[in-house]
Amino acid sequence: MSRYFTFNTIVELTCLLVASICLTKDSNRAWRGMFWFLLITCVTEMTGIYVKGLYLADRAHVRPNSWVYNIFIIFEICFPSLMFIKILTKYANSKPTILCGLAIMYLVYVYEVITDGIFKKHNLTITLMAVLFVLYSLYYFYCLLKDESYINLKYSPAFWWVSGILFYYFGGTACNIFYNKLSTVIVTPKHYLTYYIYNALNLILYSCWSYSFICRKWLTKTSAA
């Protein structure tokens, strides 16, 4: 049982707990949907660990766990895209652009499923998703800089949510580009440098998200008072 509680799963479960406290009764469907996305994320991680255990025990008959995360991509594309629509609506009519990006990502996903199957990692879809999410994030920060109204960033749910996305996907893309070199750097006898980089990116993402959920709950209470 202890194998299911890794550094990443503990961080994700903690974020899920925060989301369950702060978002399950949120008035906005996009924010409320983040709870369900995190629940799917945690189930995916646990399933991936389980399938990996089966594969290591019987490599002749059990396939690697890439297919678990390939299915998860469907949800990873959808939920953050819907959140970006919600967040960017304040500054522009971003819905057509983001829905177009959503459609393109799904088309590339279907293409990879047809050409490579479900058991091979869909690197093209993952890269495209990361690039689009980074562009959405940069556009948000551009709009934020142009916004003349006062915004206390310390308590801004949107700011912290987007910050987590930007750090995670930009850092992950950079790490993937230099993976061949970074994966040869041994930090400990059991782990390479990439292991710690991905862990750090996960921690940044879910820490920023957890804080954004807390800010969202605080703002909801304040506006209702």
Image (cartoon, rainbow, N blue to C red):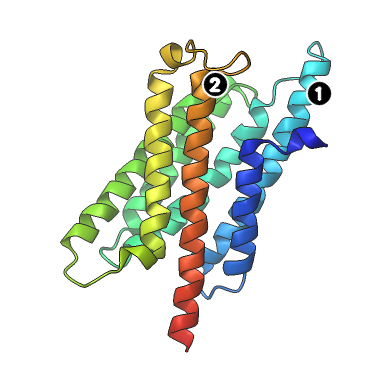
17 sits to left or right of 98: right
Quarter of the image for residue 180 reads top left
Helix, strand or loop at mark 1: helix
Image coords of residue 141 (percent x, y)? 26, 53
Helix, strand or loop at mark 2: helix
Image coords of residue 51 (percent x, y)? 76, 28
Above or below 144: residue 152: below
Q: Does the image show residue 85?
A: yes
Image coords of residue 1 (percent x, y)? 83, 37
State the residue at coordinates (57%, 46%).
75
The one nearer the camera, 177 or 198, is 198
Image coords of residue 170 (percent x, y)? 37, 36
The one nearer the camera, 134 or 74, is 134
139 sits to left or right of 171: left
Determine which residue is flagged by label 2. 115
Q: Given the image, on which type of amino acid does mark 2 rest?
A: Thr
The one nearer the camera, 31 or 171, is 171
State the residue at coordinates (37%, 48%).
100
Above or below 38: residue 181: above
39 sits to left or right of 148: right
Q: Does the image show residue 41?
A: no
Q: Given the image, on which type of amino acid does mark 1 rest?
A: Leu
Quarter of the image for residue 32 reads bottom right
Among numbered discs 1 and 2, the one appearing first in the sequence: 1
Marking on residue 54:
1
Q: How many discs mark residues in the rendered view?
A: 2
- The crowding category of the residue bearing disc 2, from other C-alpha atoms within 10 Å (few below 14, some 14 to 19, many at least 20), is few
Marking on residue 120:
none
State the residue at coordinates (69%, 26%).
65
State the residue at coordinates (63%, 52%).
14
